[in-house]
Amino acid sequence: MTQDTTAELEQLRQRVARMETVEAIKALKHRYWRACDAKNPQGFRDCFIAKGASIDFGALGRFDDADGIAKVFESIALQQVDGKPVILDMHHGVLPDITITSETTATGAWTLRFRQVNLIDNTETVSTGEYDDEYVIEDGEWKMSKCHFRPYWSITRPVTADTVVTAE
């Protein structure tokens, strides 16, 4: 093998490694949103580092560890009436912008499209905002070490008596 071929192979290896890292981080964030929508507190918590994550969700709170936001998540998402969920969420994360900063760290920005039906208050909320994240490898997996959310706008409207909402 020539020196040029060796250098080209190394560049290719590095490019593939960066693409695999970006895809692994996207998969992490998707697991996080799936856990939110599926009302899975353990899956939600598992997306963050074990200790010391920086969390800022504005009105939902600021925390220096993911355990705090996990408790808030449980208190909201797991509410039930007559054995059925009454807070129905839909998270769609789009437009990822992920920057690899080292072999074990990265940053990311995402736009969130969010919809929530609250059957206690009989409201539907549609909103959007931006995530500012940091990621690290912990125990061989990508985890969020920082997750800050900044809302852009929100619309809340009543769910009327003639609206049919089906939740399983």
Image: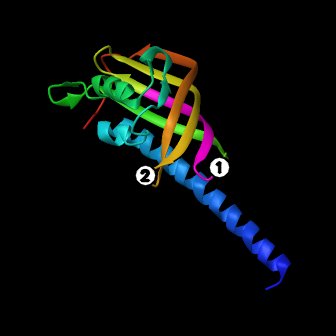
Q: Nearer the viewer, residue 39 or 16?
A: 16
Residue 82 placement, left or right of 158: left
Report the front residue among 89 and 165.
89
Residue 95 seen in the current view: no
* Residue 64 lies in quadrant: top left
How far is the residue under mark 1 from the one under mark 2?
A: 16 Å
Residue at 26% x, 29% y is 78
Q: Which mark is residue 59?
A: none
Callout 2, which amino acid? Asp
Task: From this view, report whether residue 48 is shown above or below residue 149.
Answer: below
Residue 106, magenta (yes or no): yes
Label 2: few (<14), some (14–19) or many (≥20) C-alpha neighbours in 10 Å: few
Q: Which residue is farthest left? A: 82
- Identity of the residue drawn at 34% across and 23% down: 72
Question: Label 2, on which residue?
Answer: 139
**Is residue 137 left or right of 162 when viewed as pictured?**
right
- Rendered image quadrant of residue 117: top left
Examine the image and state in which quarter residue 48 appears: top left
Choose between 164 and 130: the one closer to the eye: 130
Where in the figure is residue 88, as x and y percent of width and height? Answer: 34, 29
Q: What stretch is highlighted in magenta?
A: 103-115
Q: Which of 22 and 129 is in front in this view?
A: 22
> Residue 93 in magenta?
no
> Which amino acid is tagged 1?
Ser
Secondary structure of the magenta portion, mostly?
A: strand
- Mark 1 sits on what residue? 102
Write the residue at 20% across / 30% down.
84
